[in-house]
Amino acid sequence: MLGLAQRAVDRKWRLPMGPLVGRYNPYSPAYISDPYRQLDRLRAAAPIYRSRVTGSYVISSYELASEALTDRRYGTNRKEDSSLRSKMFFRLAKFTPEEENALDNTLGAVPDEVHQHMRKAIAYDFSRRRVTALRPRMEFWVDKLLDEAADRAEFDLIGDFAAKLPILVAAELLGFPPQDAARLQEWSDSYLVLVDPLINGAGIPRMNAAFHQFDPYVAETLRRKRAEPGDDLITRLLEHHLAGEFDEVQLRVLIMMLMIAGHEVITNLIGNAVAGLLRFPDQRELLAADPDLMPAAIEEFVRYESPIQAAWRIPGEDLEIGGVRVPAKRAVTVLIGAANNDPAQFAHPRRLDLTRGDNRHIGFALGSHFCPGTWLARVEGAAALSRLLERFPRLRGDADRLRWKPAAGLRGLYELPLTL
């Protein structure tokens, strides 16, 4: 099924939007090119909808999405989803006991008490103050990558810049050597199957192979940090582990997930922002004239083309959402991209407006499971975009020929060729 859908995307097949598929088909070529037309129709017809494609209940309105993300009756462990699609995924994946144990100890799957310990353990390093203090180091890596681009008339914003920067920054934040960035990126990319199985190159075998390389690498790093502690997140996480807040497996999995989680989100934020500025040259001119507008611009970039398009929640009990009964243990897909483009909340939502007031988007989710790397994404995105636009004010690209990844949970580009 997944292979068929991937071929449909690559070959631009016209997949039916009828009884077989229903109102929501995030893997049709038309949706991948522009999801918001289909999402507008879905929201108008059924702001909560049982999807045949995803096997979940899909929420597309801002009001219902905000309520779901802050409702403590939901969990985030997708292995508890009782839908046939979810059961078949974990059955067909054929994880080994070691791989299964790692999945059971991710941040979204551990018991609530351990989850809270983990979030507190990373709170300092992902706080606004700490991340802002790291901006000069972010700018160091930004300039290094842009120096390499400066000698070329054309470069790919994604492959040459946006995909490399988050790995370098995260490696330094965690305490990994920067010379290991290439393999850290390879391992991180391998885990995209957990979010979107249709991204080119994603697959369970590739993810499992990466795990058996990444996990020993993290274990060796921990042995080194025990002998030689540093001023880095891994050293601090090791201290929390030694205090008994989480076990060894949970520690290693948390480190791997922190390396993986922010990579694709920040890559997409940078790529989507530049694509938006190419599409709306008046906003690009506005930002060039007033660089202090960048913090507000980041919020609008996240709202307009949300790097995280969906969040999954599992109700622990039967619920009624928007007049629809949702049974316990049946996944609810909160369409963040749809909510952030709901005209009931945002005037002219498909207009990029860097001066938009009261921009209460939910691009990083809400509630106790909001994205812990929110400030890292904001500050790193601002550092990357500010330097890029300052150094290459006349950069050009074709906003009408964008190649989007076929993904329901993420929104990002495979490539974005730019002429400098």
Image: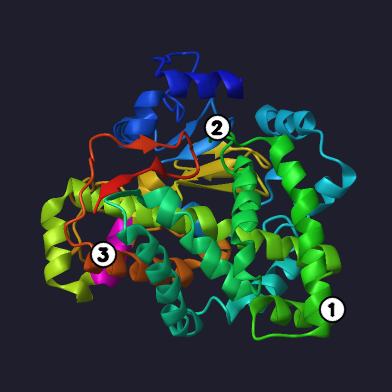
Mark 2 or 1: in front is: 2
206 sits to left or right of 61: right
What amino acid is labelled 2 in the image? Leu
Queried whether the magenta region covers residue 142, the answer comes back as no
How far from the left and from the top, in percent, is residue 376? 47, 70
- Spot occupied by residue 370 in the image (x, y as percentages of width and height): 53, 63
Which residue of the protein is positioned furthest toward the front in this rendering? 151
Query: Is residue 213 visible in this depiction of the protein?
Result: yes
Query: Would you identify the image quadrant in which residue 126 lies?
Result: bottom right
Tell whether 325 sits left or right of 234.
left
Disc sitting over residue 297 in the figure = 3
Query: In terms of image quadrants, where is residue 138?
Result: bottom left
Cα–Cα span, label 1 and label 3: 42 Å
124 over 349 or under it: above or below: below
Label 2, label 1: how many angstroms apart (C-alpha)?
39 Å
Mark 2 or mark 1: whose residue is earlier in sequence: 2
What amino acid type should be assigned to the residue bearing mark 1? Gly
What residue sits right under mark 2 in the picture? Answer: 198
Which residue sits at x=58%, y=38%? Answer: 326
**On the rendered image, what quadrant is the C terminus found in?**
bottom left
Q: Nearer the viewer, residue 245 or 61?
A: 245
Q: Which badge, 2 or 3, comes first in the chain's sequence? A: 2
Q: Are marks 2 and 3 in contact (CB under 8 Å)?
A: no
Q: Which residues are magenta?
A: 294-301
Q: Residue 228 versus residue 215: which sits nearer the camera?
A: 228
Residue 297 lies in the magenta-colored region: yes
Query: In the visual, does 276 lie left or right of 246?
Result: left
Residue corresponding to mark 1: 244
Looking at the image, which residue is at 69% across and 60% down? 256
Main SS of residues in magenta: helix
